[in-house]
């Protein structure tokens, strides 16, 4: 696999990359008015959030050029409050360099127009709307729930324990590998039992999943934050970008034409899944409005399911060999995305304006195995 770290202004570096050369983008740009990294030309210190969003979307215009037609783009963003004075729990000064305590703090001496003090500025939402105005397709708005979020002493609102991840594509058809999570017993009871506790609305749909494969992954991801001892405080946990890379960056890409391989599935026969340990009480199995198989009333009876069998991969016919897809992070920071890309066997291109962070990223990617132990 190839690891390519480049130091410089991300917009200028992006202009040097070939068009449609990247399979997936996973990044977290600097949030507006929350940190000063001490680098001239850094993003996030614009006098107004409107200027910040415009500058950021100009960068993503260039990202769109280098992204393949079938590519995916994932952007993690946090929000900011409007205020005329500093009021974070630590009582530290606004814009202190690398201040790790001012995430989701209050903006001071910044132009927020007619927006009232204490108002959430909705910067992630404004960003996603402008991205759509520029032709991006927003597929999901994902919530990153932080169960171990930083405590807040604020008395007149709730503690913020989440950030957003936006899932964009540039075309209606794109490469995507479905990800799964464990089935939930209450859902099974309500949605599969016919004539009993549930409506049976899903019946034997293959998309419903089974106890082995699970259900399609939902949009709230519960991931704890992780400490990072080096001099970069705006790092996200490695687990946060695992799912986007697995879902949005192909494992195999043709070395000649760049086309991604896709898994080929066949629908298997209706089979028993064994003892129903979730105590569901179905009385029938519905397909096309007809009961096609009676199920035992015993709550621990068999639960039939239709297997989804993987039978191979598509082939472009070039016979040139395969390699991992390429992940791009235009705001590479300490290299978390690069480390995860390496772990998953993908190529990586990282852009970072701060030369000190480039050194951190090189070190971190080299020791990527330690991030997941």
Image (cartoon, helix red, strand yellow):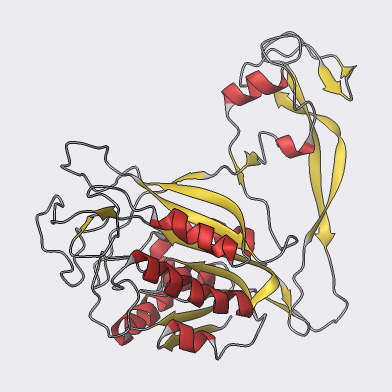
Spot occupied by residue 153 in the image (x, y as percentages of width and height): 15, 42
Q: In which quarter of the image is the N terminus?
A: bottom right
Res. 197 image quadrant: top right
Give the residue displayed 25% in from the left and 72% down from the top.
230
Check the image and report above or below for 108 versus 41: above
Farthest-out residue, bottom: 16
Check the image and report above or below for 247 versus 358: above
Spot occupied by residue 131 in the image (x, y as percentages of width and height): 54, 64
In the picture, measured across the screen, residue 106 lies left or right of residue 120, that is left
Give the residue displayed 72% in from the left and 17% down from the top.
199
Spot occupied by residue 366 in the image (x, y as percentages of width and height): 42, 78
Q: In which quarter of the image is the C terminus?
A: bottom left
Res. 192 image quadrant: top right
Give the residue displayed 56% in from the left and 67% down from the top.
344
Quick check: can you spot residue 48? yes
Res. 159 image quadrant: top left
Spot occupied by residue 9 in the image (x, y as percentages of width and height): 41, 86
Quick check: can you spot residue 242? no
In the picture, measured across the screen, residue 259 lies left or right of residue 72, that is right
């Amino acid at each position: 696999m190839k690891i390519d770290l480049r130091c410089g202004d991300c917009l200028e570096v992006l202009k040097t990359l070939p068009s449609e050369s990247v399979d997936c983008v996973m990044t977290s740009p600097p949030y507006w008015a929350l940190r000063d990294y001490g680098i001239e030309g850094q993003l996030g210190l614009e006098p107004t959030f409107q200027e910040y969003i415009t500058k950021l979307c100009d960068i993503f215009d260039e990202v769109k050029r280098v992204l393949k037609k079938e590519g995916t783009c994932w952007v993690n963003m946090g929000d900011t409050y409007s205020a005329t004075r500093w009021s974070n729990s630590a009582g530290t000064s606004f814009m202190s360099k690398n201040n790790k305590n001012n995430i989701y703090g209050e903006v001071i001496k910044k132009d927020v127009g007619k927006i009232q003090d204490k108002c959430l500025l909705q910067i992630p939402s404004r960003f996603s709307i402008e991205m759509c105005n520029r032709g991006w397709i927003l597929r999901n708005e994902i919530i990153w729930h932080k169960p171990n979020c930083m405590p807040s002493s604020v008395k007149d609102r709730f503690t913020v324990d989440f950030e957003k991840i936006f899932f964009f594509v540039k075309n209606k058809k794109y490469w995507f590998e479905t990800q799964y999570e464990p089935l939930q017993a209450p859902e099974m009871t309500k949605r599969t039992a016919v004539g009993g506790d549930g409506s049976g609305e899903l019946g034997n749909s293959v998309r419903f999943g089974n106890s082995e494969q699970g259900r399609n992954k939902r949009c709230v991801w519960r991931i704890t934050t992780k400490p990072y001892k080096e001099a970069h405080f705006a790092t996200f946990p490695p687990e946060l970008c695992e799912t986007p890379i697995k879902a949005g960056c192909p494992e195999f890409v043709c070395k000649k034409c760049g086309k991604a391989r896709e898994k080929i599935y066949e629908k298997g026969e209706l089979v028993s899944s064994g003892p129903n340990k979730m105590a569901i009480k179905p009385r029938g199995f519905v397909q096309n409005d007809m009961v096609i198989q009676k199920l035992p009333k015993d709550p621990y009876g068999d639960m039939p399911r239709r297997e989804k069998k993987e039978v191979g991969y598509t082939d472009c016919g070039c016979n040139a060999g395969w390699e991992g897809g390429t992940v791009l992070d235009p705001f590479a920071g300490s290299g978390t995305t690069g480390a995860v890309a390496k772990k998953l066997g993908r190529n990586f291109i990282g852009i970072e304006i701060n030369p000190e962070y480039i050194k951190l990223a090189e070190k971190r990617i080299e020791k990527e195995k330690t991030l997941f132990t």
